[in-house]
């Protein structure tokens, strides 16, 4: 038995060097609006202040892991990669 590699098999570059990973705060607002929640409703549901949530949604600060998990659950964001953006 031999393995034949024909045109159907291609190599794709998966890693292109160091990149910076950032929190994609814009998805918070998009998800909140899609679900028709107010900032206060989200903040109350996850145990944060409205001002803290506003800072996350505007990109002024980034939620820690505890609040990030709560946000992902409450805003129905299924994959953590949805809140990550990569830059050169």
Image (cartoon, rainbow, N blue to C red):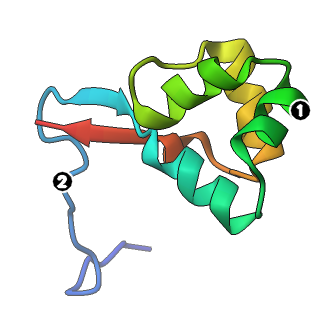
- Residue 74 picture location, percent across and down: 82, 43
Residue lying farthest right? Answer: 45
| Apparent side of residue 88 relative to residue 27 in the rendered image (left or right) | left
Residue displayed at 63% across by 27% down: 53
Note whether 77 is above or below 61 in the view shown.
below
Residue in the picture at 43% in, 34% down: 58
Q: Which image quadrant for residue 88?
A: top left
Q: Residue at label 1?
A: 45
- Sequence-wise, the earlier of marks 2 and 1 is 2
Q: In the picture, which quadrant includes the N terminus?
A: bottom left
- Quadrant of residue 34 within the rendered picture: bottom right
Instruction: Locate residue 7, reporting x and y percent.
Output: 20, 87
**Residue 36 location (% of width, % of height):** 76, 63
Which numbered disc, 2 or 1, marks the residue closer to the eye? 1
Count of numbered tags: 2
- Rendering coords of residue 69 (x, y %): 74, 28
State left or right for residue 7 relative to residue 29. left
Q: Secondary structure at mark 2?
A: loop
Considering the numbered disc 1 on the image, is that residue within a helix, a strand or a loop?
Answer: helix
In the image shown, does 47 or 14 lie closer to the viewer? 47
Q: Residues within 10 Å of mark 1 (few under 14, many from 20)?
A: few
How crowded is the residue under tag 2: few (<14 C-alpha within 10 Å), some, or many (20+)?
few
Q: CA distance from mark 2 to mark 1?
A: 41 Å
Q: Is residue 41 above or below residue 48?
A: below
At 77% from the left and 29% from the top, the residue drawn is 43
Which residue has dot 2 on it? 13
């Amino acid at each position: 038995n031999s393995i034949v590699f024909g045109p159907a098999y291609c190599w794709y570059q998966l890693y292109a060097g160091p990149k910076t990973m950032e929190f994609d705060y814009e998805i918070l607002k998009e998800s909140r609006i899609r679900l028709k929640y107010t900032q206060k409703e989200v903040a109350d549901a996850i145990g944060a202040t409205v001002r803290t949530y506003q800072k996350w949604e505007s990109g002024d600060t980034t939620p820690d892991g505890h609040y990030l998990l709560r946000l992902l659950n409450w805003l129905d964001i299924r994959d953590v990669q949805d809140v990550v953006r990569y830059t050169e």
